[in-house]
Amino acid sequence: MDGKIEQGKPRRKPRILPPFPRRLKWLHVQSPAMTQDPSVPVLTLDGPSGSGKGTICRLVALRLGWHYLDSGALYRAVGLAAAWADIDLSDAPALVRCTFDTDIDFRDRTDESSGGGEPRIIVNGVDATDELRTETAGAAASAIAAIPEVRAALKDRQRAYRRPPGLVADGRDMGTVIFPDAAHKVFLTASAEERAERRYKQLSEKGVSVTLPGLLREILARDARDANRAVAPLRPAEDAVRIDTTGLSIDEVVERVLALVPAR
Ligand code: DC
């Protein structure tokens, strides 16, 4: 044949793997557990509970036409699934198994008429949206979130939400641990008193019976636990823009956040 190409056979380019050390990295990046695409833009919004992150993130995601990750809901869902399975919140190995076994599905309702598109959250086939919003679920989430193995078990699951055309990620460690390479990072704050009042209004409207001083105590306790834990404590990323939402309307905060994402 002397270098001639056989008729009828497509000319196939030889597949060349990168040399050894780079090949390892290449294989790692291709592994199914790392499904995030680093070219997809991410906007992270971190902050303490009651800083308005949920509403702001949903509205920002809607305006950008990007996906939305409510990472707190993942921790809440695992806490709830653990309660359903009678798992003790101090039993780390059982909680890690529960984290892998829990099926969590967000059913999007992204039209504005549904109040910014609050999704239904289905845990192991059960619509648990209302149960997940309770202070009990929040406290359980905060407790399991302090366990490093649980956080590690949720890492890839959170990163898999990074899909085109973009992702708005809401949580405590989105800018510091989960998406440290995010192009846009925001840290939202508000005074504890204002956060307690917002929560009081929200829960009262839903017919949940709570007291303002009780909510303030719970918010301060959760802040302290989230900020002082050893792994991924609540803190702003060094490159995050801080926005204090005390006294600002939702629309004002949404506009300030959107102004950080250029050339849409
Ligand atoms: O955002 P949220 O209130 O739904 O979160 C519930 C708890 O989950 C919160 O107290 C701390 C924990 N959490 C976390 O540790 N890391 C995240 N990225 C999101 C939530």
Image (spheres, rainbow, N blue to C red):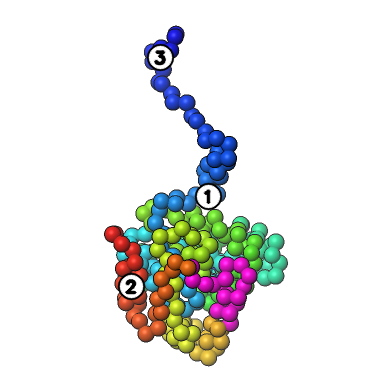
| Residue 23 pos. (x, y %) | 55, 38
Of the numbered discs 1 and 3, the one sitting upstream in the chain is 3
Q: Quadrant of the N terminus?
A: top left
Confirm whether the magenta stretch covers residue 44.
no
Q: Quadrant of residue 146?
A: bottom right
Give the residues drawn in magenta, as a range. Answer: 221-237
**Residue at which label 2 appears:** 256
Which secondary structure lies at badge 1? loop
Height in image: 199 above or below 113?
below
Contact, mark 1 vs mark 3 (Cβ under 8 Å): no
| Residue 201 pos. (x, y %) | 43, 85
| Residue 249 pos. (x, y %) | 34, 80
Real-space Cα separation, disc 3 to disc 2, in angstroms: 62 Å
Real-space Cα separation, disc 2 to disc 1, in angstroms: 32 Å
Horizontally, is 219 left or right of 110 in the view? right
**Camera-side mark, 2 or 1:** 2
**Residue at which label 1 appears:** 34
Instruction: Give me the disc on residue 5.
Output: 3
Q: Can residue 132 be seen at all in this image of the molecule?
A: no
Which residue type does callout 1 highlight?
A: Met
